[in-house]
Image (tube, rainbow, N blue to C red):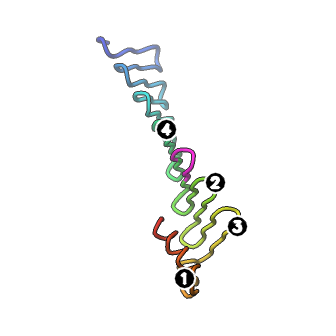
Amino acid sequence: IGPSVLVIGPSVLVVGPSVLVVGPSVLVVGPSVLVIGPSVLVVGPSVLVIGPSVLVVGPSVLVVGPSVLVIGPSVLVVGPSVLVVGPSVLVVGFRNHLRHKPGNAWFKVSVVQMLF
């Protein structure tokens, strides 16, 4: 169909040099965007979205639903109250009870709160 639209059989559609549709579920836009069905979206080499709840950004950031965040191999945040940093630090409810601890511990938690 014209110089830019190509239909191959009942399931493959090519529009220009950048859009490819395969069947009812696969859409490729340029070299960086891939949509598979209603739930999987890949943007470039670093962003992957699966359904409404899973987001992967690069090799280091993973978001699962509204409550779980993983950053790299060492930082895990679960909801508003659980923070795991590396294999040795676990903070539970740091927004409440660590506020009253004196000294260096509250400063470190404040820095983590600012980062997130």
Distance from the alpha carbon under mark 1 to that under mark 3: 21 Å
* Tag 1 secondary structure: loop
- Disc nearer the start of the sequence (3/4): 4
Q: Which residues are magenta?
A: 57-62
Question: Where is mark 3, residue-wise?
Answer: 88
User: To which residue does mark 2 refer?
Assistant: 73
**Residue lying farthest to the right in this orientation:** 87
In three-dimensional space, the C-alpha distance between marks 2 and 4, rounded to whole angstroms, equals 22 Å
Q: Amino acid at mark 3?
A: Ser
| Foreground label between 2 and 1 | 2
Question: How busy is the neighbourhood of tag 4: few (under 14 within 10 Å), some, or many (20 plus)?
Answer: some
Of circles 2 and 4, which is in front? Answer: 2
**Amino acid tagged 2:** Pro
Q: CB of mark 2 within 8 Å of CB of mark 4?
A: no
Tell whether 115 sits left or right of 64.
left
Q: Which residue is mark 4?
A: 42
Location of the N terminus (image quadrant): top left
The answer to the question of whether label 1 and label 3 lie on touching residues, with beta carbons closer than 8 A, is no
- Closer to the observer: label 3 or label 4? 3
Mark 1 neighbour density, 10 Å: few (under 14) some (14–19) many (20 or more): few
Q: Secondary structure at mark 3?
A: loop
Q: Position of residue 54 (x, y in %)?
A: 54, 51
Horizontal arrangement in the rendering, residue 13 relative to residue 2 (left or right): right
At 56% from the left and 52% from the top, the residue drawn is 62
